[in-house]
Amino acid sequence: MIGIIIVAHGKYAEGLLDAVYLIAGQQEKIETIGLFEGDNLDDLTQKIAEKIDKLDDGSGVIVFVDMFGASPSNIVSKLMNKNFVSVTGVNLPMILEILMNRDSLNLDDIAKLAIEAGKESIMNLTERIKEILNKKI
């Protein structure tokens, strides 16, 4: 089973996992790491590396980060010699989609699926509701 790690600023990763548990119940092989003011980046790099090793049963790990170019993504980029893929811009639909499919897809396909799920979940809700209502009239 593909492992999942969410690395983000502050308590964002923890909040996403809390929402996952609310919607999908407790999950195996999913962990979070928050970056807080004053954290030592070398220690954080080591912590991420250890979690990747812990969650990798041979299927690999997907590491979600909150945004490209920030410390979490920069740190994860240093670890590319490990068996994982990383996707930026993490959101709740991405994680839920991965949870439903991580037993049946490889790492490359799971990364593509995560990106597609993330993109599809972003929309102008007001415009979407108007479209739906206009179709029913």
Image: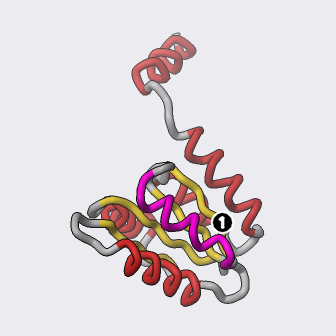
Residue at the spot 45% in from the left edge and 54% down from the top edge: 92
Please, is residue 49 above or below residue 32 in the view? below
Residue 105 x %, y %: 76, 67
Res 116 quadrant in image: top right
Give the left or right position of residue 108, taking residue 128 as reference.
right
Position of residue 27 in the picture relative to residue 104 (left or right): left
**Which image quadrant for residue 17?**
bottom left
Q: Quadrant of the N terminus?
A: bottom right
Front residue of 28/10: it is 10
| Spot occupied by residue 123 in the image (x, y as percentages of width and height) | 49, 30
Q: Is residue 86 above or below residue 130?
A: below
Look at mark 1 in the image and give the residue it sits on. 85
Residue in view at x 52 percent, y 81 percent: 49
**Residue in the picture at 27% in, 62% down:** 10
Give above or below for 136 relative to 124.
above
Q: Which residues are magenta?
A: 70-82
Q: Residues within 10 Å of mark 1 (few under 14, many from 20)?
A: some
Q: Answer above or below: position of 102 versus 56.
A: above
Question: Which one is nearer the viewer's eye here, 129 or 58?
Answer: 58
Residue type indicated by callout 1: Val
Q: Give the number of callouts.
A: 1
Asked if residue 73 lies left or right of residue 53, the reply is: left
Using the image as rendered, state which of residue 83 and residue 57 is in the foreground: 83
Residue 118 percent across, percent down from the top left: 56, 46
Label 1 secondary element? strand
x, y percent for residue 11: 27, 63
Q: How is the image coloured?
A: secondary structure
Question: Any magenta on residue 75?
Answer: yes
Residue occupying the point 56% across, 81% down: 52
